[in-house]
Amino acid sequence: EPEVTQTPSHQVTQMGQEVILRCVPISNHLYFYWYRQILGQKVEFLVSFYNNEISEKSEIFDDQFSVERPDGSNFTLKIRSTKLEDSAMYFCASSAGQTIDEQFFGPGTRLTVL
Amino acid sequence: GESVGLHLPTLSVQEGDNSIINCAYSNSASDYFIWYKQESGKGPQFIIDIRSNMDKRQGQRVTVLLNKTVKHLSLQIAATQPGDSAVYFCAEKWNAGNMLTFGGGTRLMVKP
């Protein structure tokens, strides 16, 4: 069964450093998403991406965040200058279409900012 | 702002019993609802969904009920098994976009 994969599973970084979280969505999917989950809290939407551009973003997704599809298979989330409060699980998801199409989630990357 | 929320943070049931997990939503524009299961160390896993033009949908051992009058969503799990132990999230979506808004989560613990 096809699945979304994410690397690394755990990333530790120093405050102020840049990190890139990587995702490989399901191959025939067209819509890609990033969500985050701070420990003990609910999952929060960050951004959706379609046709090589951002289609929707939340207020969390400020100028320090960016997304990119550098090739035909990878989808990345970059955080330019990490802050302590960026520590969270980051989930990538993909869907074949939008609105009512199921979003498939990856296993997540745990980001720890020291 | 409007949000999705849950009534019970933890639900403990005996193996074999039925489980009911509840969710309240406040966005009347929401037209699609999903239940996700999240096991420790894993991402959310789709369980079942329902559109706003329906009030009930059944899957394998799971049923989702939607009451738009009181803006309430529930997930019923029949004959709960130890493998059902996880955190369950409801999520909503509306036509304006494709982002999911998640509730706070309910932890289901199944006692053998």
Image (cartoon, coloured by chain):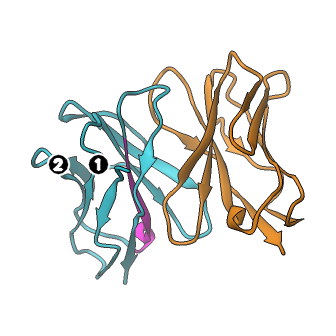
Chain colours: A cyan, B orange
Neighbour tally class for label 1: few under 14, some 14-19, many 20 plus, Cα within 10 Å: many
Q: Is residue B34 visible?
A: no
Residue B23: x and y, percent?
77, 43
Contact between marks 1 and 2 (CB within 8 A): the answer is yes
Q: Give the prevailing secondary structure in the magenta stretch.
A: strand
Return the residue nearer the eye: B2 or B69: B69
Q: Is residue A65 visible?
A: yes
**Highlighted range, magenta:** A84-94
Residue drawn at (74%, 45%) of the image: B61
Q: Quadrant of residue A22?
A: bottom left
Quarter of the picture containing the C terminus of chain A is: bottom left
Q: Is residue A36 above or below residue B52?
A: below
Residue that label 2 marks? A73
* A90 left or right, relative to B22: left
Residue B21: x and y, percent?
80, 49
Query: Which of the chains bears the disc numbered 2?
Result: A
Residue drawn at (16%, 46%) of the image: A69
Q: What type is the residue that disc 2 sits on?
A: Ser
3D distance between C-alphas at marks 1 and 2: 7 Å
Residue A93 is inside the magenta segment: yes
The local secondary structure at tag 1 comes to loop
* A82 left or right, relative to B42: left
Establish whether labels 1 and 2 are both on one chain. yes
Q: What type is the residue that disc 1 sits on?
A: Pro
Return the residue nearer the eye: B29 or B1: B29
* B93 left or right, relative to A73: right
Tag shown at residue A25:
1
Return the residue nearer the eye: A58 or A89: A89
